[in-house]
Amino acid sequence: MRPIWAIAVLTWKAAFRYRLFWVVSALLLASVVGLPLILKDDGTARGFTQILLTYTLSAITGLLGLCTLWLACGTLARDLEECQIQLVAVKPVARWKIWLGKWLGLVSLSGVMLLLAGGCVYGLLFYRASTLPEDQQAVLFKEVLVARGSARPPDFRNEIAAETDRRLRERLAQQPQLKADLAEVRRQIEEQVKAEYQIVPPGYIKIWQVDLGLRRMFLQQRPMHLRIKFNAAATSETGTFTGLWQVGMPESPWLWRSEPMSLAPDTFHEFEIPPDLWDDQGRLTIAFLNANNVTLLFPLDEGIEVLYWQGGFLLNYLRGLGILYCWIILLATLGLSMASFLSFPVAAFVSLAALVLVFGSGTIRTVVTEGTLLGWDPETEGPSQTWIDKIGVPVFKGIWWIIQLAKGFAPIDALSTGRSVGWTDLARAVGQIVGLLGGLLAAAGIWGFQRRELATATPIQ
């Protein structure tokens, strides 16, 4: 390991000679200290964490990721172009050790910078929390600076799909001309079926059941929170709507009823519910009475959610930083791998293009969802089956699968809303981002560096 560590130390020294490193360090300092001072919160616990966690951690991740990617491309490509790598390659050090030493230097440097920036954010978070009003401090430490798990009612996805297909067949049997626009007709029917599972007419009661399962064994005597969101079919004079909530089995002595609540639509609301309201099977029954003249709609994906305590904030915060670090490690591996094959400008361009592809993946998701690049074929009543779709759709599915391996995590959103970043999430991030994607990129980079010609012999004239 001595040659690898020696090259890692040289990589640190080379990074310090880059002006970009010092520029990014100054920007990181400005993000940690200056951003919370420039952007004022609204005095609430939610607004406070939005500034100090969401914006600050997003800025830190973006700046540090860009710096790591640029240094990874430059530290190897420029050594090759300026023939400095020959001074190391002629020594009894295997090329894979050279590559691994540079990778270790980059990821260790980025890890130290992320840890320092994250530590500053953590300290500033608790320091600034003392400036909040007392009631908002209570909300902050009870609902935000914690690690909370989540449980939801069934989404009825299979039932909705089956009912949609049944109604679509009936509609086509009555109106065959609708085959010309089959995708739009199916979408309309699906929205109608979804609405039946989501709406609460005036004066009606809507009931949900949330299965806590074995989790209830760890939640005894711990209060939980109900997080709700609804849409309204029309506006009201006050801009709010009145509703009453009930949690627990009606025949059980352990039953909680709320006072009439005045709630605004199209926004999330959280309120505390007493502990131990589930039945013997761990099912939590939630009922809502619509006391308005307007139909209300609770979306299936985010209308009802039960939040429960899972742990403290510090470990949750460190796990979130761990996932961010996995992304940075992947960027370091990507930059070094590109530099193993390409010159510095081309390696930087290709790496940044891959980064843009990940962040702009909306088109890829649309193609994967619809199963076609050219749209629906009215004759076959399904996706187009041209050779473009036969080749392009599987390629897009593969790209989307790779993107989801790296992008399917949201640690910053989880931290800013008091959600739990579990050990399984961190382990999955390490396995998918560092182990699978990073391992494949590293293997390709080492192979390319092994086969690359470092110098060309020129005959003496």
Image (spheres, rainbow, N blue to C red):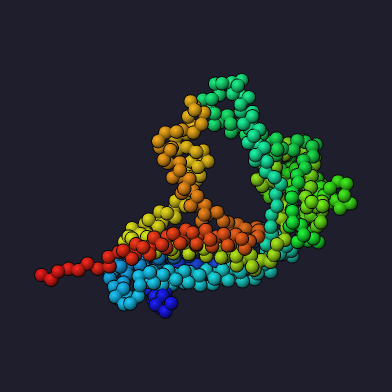
Q: Quadrant of residue 445?
A: bottom left
Question: Would residue 422 be seen by someone viewing this image from the given angle?
Answer: yes
- Residue at x 13% of width, y 71% of height: 460
Q: Quadrant of residue 288?
A: top right
Residue furthest left in the image: 461
- Residue at x 51% of width, y 25% of height: 180
Question: Would residue 77 be seen by someone viewing this image from the given angle?
Answer: no
- Residue at x 29% of width, y 73% of height: 86
Q: Where is residue 234 in the image (x, y as percent from the top left)?
A: 69, 36
Quarter of the picture holding the N terminus: bottom left
Q: Position of residue 278 (x, y in %)?
A: 80, 52
Quarter of the picture holding the C terminus: bottom left
In this rendering, would 16 be left or right of 365?
Answer: left
Front-most of 91 and 183?
A: 91
Front-most of 9 and 299?
A: 9
Q: Position of residue 252 (x, y in %)?
A: 87, 49
Q: How many marks?
A: 0
Q: Where is residue 22 in the image (x, y as percent from the top left)?
A: 43, 71
Front-most of 132 and 308?
A: 308
Q: Quadrant of residue 39?
A: bottom right
- Residue at x 72% of width, y 61% of height: 309
Front-most of 342 and 432?
A: 432
In this rendering, would 318 be left or right of 364?
Answer: right
